[in-house]
Amino acid sequence: MRDDHIISAKQLSRSDIEAVLDRAAEIADDPGAVADSKDGELLGLLFFEPSTRTKMSFTTAMKRLGGDTVDMGSVESSSVKKGESLADTVRVIEGYADALVLRHPSEGSAKLASDFVDVPVINAGDGAGQHPTQTLLDLYTIRENAGFDDLTIGIMGDLKYGRTVHSLAHALTNFDASQHFISPESLRLPRSVRYDLHEAGAQVREHTDLEDVLGTLDVLYVTRIQRERFPDENEYRQVAGEYRIDTELLERANDDLTVMHPLPRVDEIAPDVDGTEYATYFEQAHNGVPVRMALLEELL
């Protein structure tokens, strides 16, 4: 993947994924071994939407590699507020950094940006499209906790607008994984995503009731209902809070179930789950650092 853009999980082969995950595991075991390997390199951060984990973990990853970051800052404090186009913004910041990390509300924005620059562009989320580096840390967490052999995973919540869901579902077609998608009818997987999964050989099993499959799952990947993606506030209110995980519900799950969430959560997972052995979502967030260190080491 050297000098390539990372735009979509669709572009990642099994060998690409395993190379990043293997390297991330090595870095997690001995973070000091890569200190200063990217001394003098700069990572440009362009976040047109709010971010905590993705932005901070990329910053941490680059600094632990010995490099540094330059940050566009908020949209309100940048030239975007004056009407500057995305193409012009990335062409300017290309002159300041060795790679760019872009989050943008418009699907396809990362691909567009990559057409205008020669440095690597990493998609940190493009609307309801893709979020490939989140997928890599998700896969790392799955491998560490459940493995990829004969994996049965349930993906639940906002499957229509959830970019983490779209990315993860595509990436899992590289492995021996049975995927179950649980959502309200109005938030089921988009037709285009279902088509791509079928083309990749996946069997798409869709449900509206988690309890139909809960006892069969090795991993339950929970997502929040994303209020900011809904064009209609009334549509959001109809489905908000429809799915909620708590310890009472998990009594009907496998003892070895791994519960994941890309965060932030609202009320999809009750706080009483946090102290159980099921919960891995904070570990999942922490895994973003070694995984993104491994990816930056490769791209740069």
Image: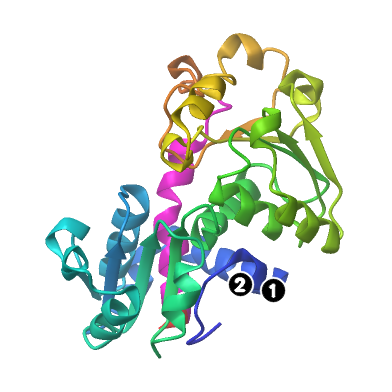
**134 versus 293 height, above or below:** above
Label 2 SS? helix
Q: Quadrant of the N terminus?
A: bottom right
Q: Quadrant of the C terminus?
A: bottom left
Task: Choose between 79 and 130: the one closer to the eye.
Answer: 79
Q: On the image, which quarter does residue 87 sit in?
A: bottom left
- The disc at residue 87 is none
Q: Residues within 10 Å of mark 2 (few under 14, many from 20)?
A: some
Is residue 4 visible to us here? yes
Would you say the magenta stretch is mainly helix, strand or loop? Answer: helix
**220 versus 293 height, above or below:** above
Looking at the rendering, the stretch of residues picked out in magenta corresponds to: 276-298
Which residue bears the numbered disc 2? 19
Q: Position of residue 207 (x, y in %)?
A: 78, 29
Which residue bears the numbered disc 1? 15
Q: On the image, which quarter does residue 119 sit in?
A: bottom left
Amino acid type for the residue under numbered disc 1: Ser
Q: Position of residue 16 (x, y in %)?
A: 64, 73
**113 versus 248 height, above or below:** below
Query: What residue is shown at x 30% (from left), y 60% (from top)?
Result: 47
As for residue 289 lying within the magenta part, the answer is: yes
Q: On the image, which quarter does residue 98 sit in?
A: bottom left
